[in-house]
Image (cartoon, grey):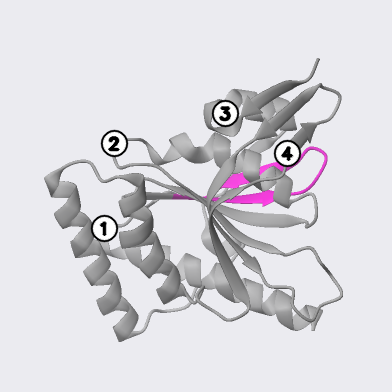
């Protein structure tokens, strides 16, 4: 009998057991990405986003929808994700994930997924640039990790690696997921949008991930 699981209800332990994930800690973004200095304009825009977060946070819990609209959307725009060849989807259902050697299927819905577009290509498989899982501000950003890993596992079926991000609006936990036997996910340092240096690094990382996509595109073309 086949068991169907909802990714939202999985614990980190269950995800690691189901997909054989191995966890690694990485204390440096620069081991994976090339971070560039922010322009004065980017710093000013980031300051506005930070001030808006602090204002909303001071009034109480910030909903998941507000986090996507007020903070993730402008951050992704600043980072360059609003590009003609990048498609951003919201609340996208993932194809069923069948777990090998077990009669188990995992279903779920990604909050935000940024992929390349495939018009004019010979390939029909979009490249996953970044998958994001958002939680409301009363939860720990780390609570989104099980869902994020389950969704990313589907992405690395067709590519060697993918970037993930789970956030509660204040804290931003990046994860680098790699195909392999076993598949590996690297936890990077957690970033805090309320702290100036940390928020600047957050935007630098998002820009670097987006730029990495452009490098991949130039290689493909």
Instruction: Look at discs 3 and 2 and give the one toward the viewer.
Output: 2
Secondary structure under the numbered disc 3 in the rendered image:
helix
Q: Position of residue 187 (x, y in %)?
A: 55, 45
Hey, which residue is sitting farthest top in the picture? 1
Whether 55 is drawn above or below 150: the answer is below
Residue 171 is left or right of residue 5, and the answer is left
> Which residue is under mark 4?
96
- Could you tell me which residue is drawn at 62 percent across and 41 percent down? 149
Mark earlier in primary sequence (3, 2): 3
> Which residue is under mark 3?
12
Q: Is residue 90 visible?
A: yes
> Which residue is under mark 2?
138
Question: Is mark 3 in CB contact (under 8 Å) with mark 1?
Answer: no
Mark earlier in primary sequence (2, 1): 2
Give yes or no for residue 175 being in the magenta stretch.
Answer: yes
Secondary structure under the numbered disc 2 in the rendered image:
loop
Instruction: Look at discs 3 and 1 and give the one toward the viewer.
Output: 3
Question: Is mark 4 in CB contact (under 8 Å) with mark 1?
Answer: no
Callout 2 crowding tier (Cα within 10 Å): few <14, some 14–19, many ≥20: some
Q: Nearer the viewer, residue 209 or 168?
A: 168
């Amino acid at each position: 009998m086949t068991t169907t699981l909802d990714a939202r209800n999985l614990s980190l332990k269950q995800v690691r057991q189901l997909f054989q994930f191995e966890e690694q800690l990485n204390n440096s973004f620069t081991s994976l990405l090339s971070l560039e200095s922010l322009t004065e304009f980017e710093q000013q825009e980031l300051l506005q986003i930070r001030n808006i977060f602090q204002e909303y946070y001071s009034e109480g819990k910030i909903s998941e929808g507000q986090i996507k609209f007020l903070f993730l959307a402008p951050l992704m725009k600043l980072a360059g994700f609003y590009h003609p060849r990048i498609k951003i989807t919201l609340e996208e259902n993932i194809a069923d994930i069948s777990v090998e050697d077990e009669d188990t299927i995992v279903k779920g819905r990604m909050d935000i997924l940024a992929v390349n577009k495939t018009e004019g290509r010979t390939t029909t498989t979009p490249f996953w640039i970044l998958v994001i899982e958002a939680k409301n501000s009363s939860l720990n950003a780390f609570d989104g990790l099980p869902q994020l890993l389950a969704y990313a596992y589907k992405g690395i079926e067709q590519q060697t690696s993918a970037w993930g991000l789970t956030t509660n609006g204040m804290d931003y936990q990046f994860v680098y997921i790699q195909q392999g036997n076993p598949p590996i996910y690297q936890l990077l340092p957690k970033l805090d949008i309320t702290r100036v240096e940390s928020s600047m690094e957050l935007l630098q990382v998002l820009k670097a991930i987006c730029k990495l996509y452009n490098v991949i595109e130039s290689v493909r073309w």
